[in-house]
């Protein structure tokens, strides 16, 4: 059965993409959800960011477990557990809205969503055209994110957080339909990438550190963007509209990674995406007007989704056995989960400048850390 499974088939790729979208149901709309915790639960801004961070902590822990080497478990069974946890966590969240224990079902939902995210990225990483399929994956989830961010203020006013969590639970349940269309194990991979070269453990660790630093920057920024807009004097719907437009730009960014992959190459794409992303956050320092806020968030989101396929495909080529995607996604989720928790500590004084500066610092650190293994990889390619 495993030999007959086509990881590059339409059903397999479509299932991985669908699961990726289900996995980020709450994360991709996190800025608006954090604001919803403030306005509908009466939480302080640090407490709201912390609540989002607890869910992301669950996501991070789940991705670490699923990325453990030599874990001999049928992926379909793991996926089923992840979907059930997501359903139970979101149902529990609906039942405990406004209660002190709301963090617990959000953590459980995070465990479920993290399992789904990790496996969906892993499935994509086994395909022959990783960059293209990651881009398709991003377009799908960003299209959902754009709509979600745009309608979130009105939706929460209409159905409240309880209704939203019930919707999340129902959508998560549809993930069970994909179980027969995902691989059992990594043995379905047909062949290693022709540009893959084996790096030593030290360089692999540095590369994963670069992925972690990049996603810590993303996690900090994504958690506070809505709050930054509100602090600048913009209305909730204005901020929601700006983030909706940023998701449209993010879709173009993901598509751009497909059409410009050969023209730019991974070196140029990663340098441009990471450094220009830092510049976009720098635009938000202080109290930006609507136009500058719009430019900053649109640039940030577009570049994030433009450069992510390049980063994942590049790191994946550092191991000839295809084992880097799981750890890379674990680092990604640790960063995206740790980012909000770190941001909550940095905004305790009521300002966002410290969080924004730390975010920019992580962007720069990530570029430096990714460059070293990329240089080594290039030398190995040249030697071959």
Image (cartoon, rainbow, N blue to C red):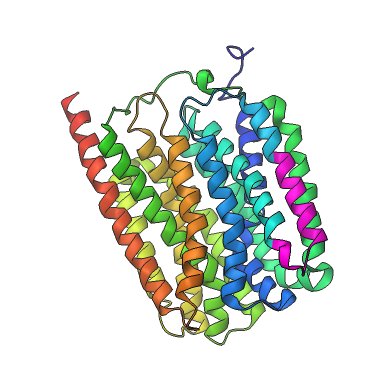
Q: Is residue 266 visible?
A: yes
Tell me, yes or no, whether the highlighted magenta stretch contains residue 97: yes
Magenta residue span:
83-102
**Where 34 sits versus 315, above or below?**
below
Quadrant of the frame with the N terminus: top right
Tell me, yes or no, whether the highlighted magenta stretch contains residue 193: no
Q: Position of residue 264 (x, y in %)?
A: 32, 46
Q: Is the stretch drawn in magenta largely helix, strand or loop? A: helix
User: Which residue in the rendered view is the most extreme toward the bottom?
Assistant: 233
The answer to which quarter of the image holds residue 382 is top left
Q: Position of residue 368 (x, y in %)?
A: 25, 53
Q: Position of residue 210 (x, y in %)?
A: 34, 49
The answer to which quarter of the image holds residue 324 is top left
Q: 245 and 224: which one is in front?
A: 224
Quadrant of the frame with the C terminus: top left
Q: Residue at (54%, 66%) from the top-left corner?
A: 223
* Left-right relation of 138 to 176: left
Q: Position of residue 61 (x, y in %)?
A: 54, 46
* Left-right relation of 69 to 375: right
């Amino acid at each position: 059965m495993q030999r007959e499974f086509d990881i590059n088939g339409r059903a397999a790729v479509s299932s991985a993409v669908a699961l990726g979208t289900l996995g980020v149901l709450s994360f991709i709309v996190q800025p608006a959800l954090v604001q919803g915790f403030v306005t509908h639960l009466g939480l302080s801004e640090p407490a709201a960011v912390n609540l989002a961070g607890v869910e992301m902590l669950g996501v991070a822990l789940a991705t670490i477990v699923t990325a453990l080497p030599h874990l001999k478990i049928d992926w379909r069974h793991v996926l089923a557990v992840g979907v059930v946890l997501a359903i139970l966590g979101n149902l529990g969240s609906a039942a405990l809205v406004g209660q002190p224990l709301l963090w617990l079902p959000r953590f459980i939902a995070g465990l479920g969503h993290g399992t789904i995210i990790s496996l969906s990225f892993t499935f994509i990483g086994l395909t022959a055209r990783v960059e293209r399929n990651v881009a398709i994956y991003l377009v799908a989830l960003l299209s959902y994110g754009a709509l979600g961010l745009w309608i979130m203020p009105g939706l929460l006013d209409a159905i409240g957080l309880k209704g939203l969590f019930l919707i999340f639970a129902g959508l998560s349940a549809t993930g069970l339909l994909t179980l027969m269309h995902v691989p059992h194990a990594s043995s379905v991979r047909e062949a290693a990438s022709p540009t893959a070269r084996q790096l030593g453990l030290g360089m692999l660790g540095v590369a994963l550190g670069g992925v972690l630093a990049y996603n810590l920057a993303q996690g900090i920024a994504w958690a506070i963007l809505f709050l930054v807009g509100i602090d600048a004097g913009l209305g909730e719907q204005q901020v929601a509209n700006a983030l909706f437009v940023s998701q449209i730009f993010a879709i173009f960014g993901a598509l751009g990674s497909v059409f410009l992959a050969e023209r730019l190459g991974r070196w140029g794409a990663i340098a441009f995406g990471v450094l220009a992303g830092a510049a976009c956050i720098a635009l938000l320092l202080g109290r930006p007007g609507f136009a500058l806020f719009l430019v900053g968030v649109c640039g940030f989101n577009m570049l994030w989704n433009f450069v992510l396929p390049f980063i994942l495909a590049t790191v994946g080529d550092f191991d000839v056995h295809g084992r880097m995607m799981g750890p890379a996604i674990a680092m990604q989720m640790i960063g995206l989960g740790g980012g909000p928790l770190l941001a909550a500590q940095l905004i305790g004084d009521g300002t966002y400048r410290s969080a924004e500066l730390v975010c920019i610092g992580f962007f720069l650190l990530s570029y430096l850390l990714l460059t070293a293994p990329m240089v080594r990889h290039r030398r190995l390619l040249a030697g071959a």
